[in-house]
Amino acid sequence: MADTPADLALPAESPAQIDFFRSVYDPDLDFRKLASEATYFTRGFRLVEKDDLIGVPHVIISVTYREGYVTETGIKGDYVSVEAVTADAATLDSPQVKSMTDSRELAVYPNEAVVYNDGGKGIRRSLTELFTRMGLVNPGYATQQDENPADRPFSLWVSGEDAATSGIIADANGEKFRYVAMRGLRKSDYDSPYGPATTFYFA
């Protein structure tokens, strides 16, 4: 049976439709094309949740202590803002990292500059202990048996408050601060006197 004109007919876009698509997409303004031509870039860090970095390798390049809430004892607490860069695409795609992330769809890009906050006895404590060993801060000695001086707010430190609140980006010799969290973060869920709680640690 011969094809009829109706069988051969193809839907045609009207001039109005063509003009509409041209206004939506301009190949000269393609994002990847423009990005490849760029010579200036922002130095922004995207705020992410710590859950986004569970099992995700990253390198910490800056740590800044910031004022937090006043505690029940009337002491102003604090937290750390951690600036970091996630692993490259090949590392994130490796079997070893996929096993740490349970092959989940990641919320971060490869080599992405991110920032996350922590005020608990996990990440903040570990970093404060590290900076104490490096001689950058001195939170003082424990005043009771179960106290960890690294948990003390910077307002109560013996020294190092200025460096901590300005942002620690180098060691005592001026070398750039680079702290590799090769296994990313992990978290511990538990019951506290105030209800369910979570503490994040370096894995």
Image (cartoon, rainbow, N blue to C red):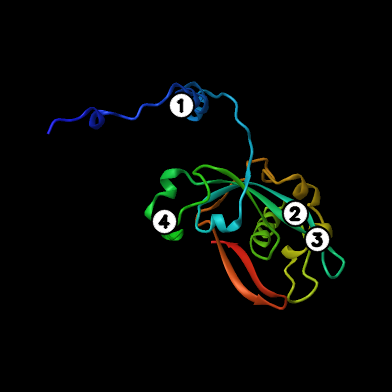
Task: Give how far apart the Cα atoms at labels 1 and 2 are.
Answer: 65 Å
Task: Look at 80% across and 60% down and name the residue there.
Answer: 69
Residue highlighted by disc 1: 17
| Lateral position of residue 5 relative to residue 30, left or right | left
SS category of the residue bearing label 1: helix
Q: Earlier in the sequence, mark 2 or mark 3?
A: 3
| Lateral position of residue 159 relative to residue 11, left or right | right
Q: Nearer the viewer, residue 156 or 13?
A: 13
Please name which of the two marks, 4 or 2, marks the residue nearer to the observer: 4
Q: Earlier in the sequence, mark 3 or mark 4?
A: 3
SS category of the residue bearing label 4: helix
Task: Give how far apart the Cα atoms at labels 3 and 4 are.
Answer: 37 Å
When the figure is inspected, residue 190 is found, relative to residue 111, above or below; the finding is below
Residue highlighted by disc 3: 69
Q: Residue furthest right?
A: 74
SS category of the residue bearing label 2: loop
Residue highlighted by disc 4: 98
Task: Give how far apart the Cα atoms at labels 4 and 2 are.
Answer: 36 Å
The x and y percentages for residue 50 are 60, 57
The x and y percentages for residue 131 are 69, 54
Please name which of the two marks, 2 or 3, marks the residue nearer to the observer: 3
Q: Residue furthest left?
A: 1
Query: What label sits on residue 137 in the rendered view?
Result: 2
Circles 1 and 4: CB distance less than 8 Å? no
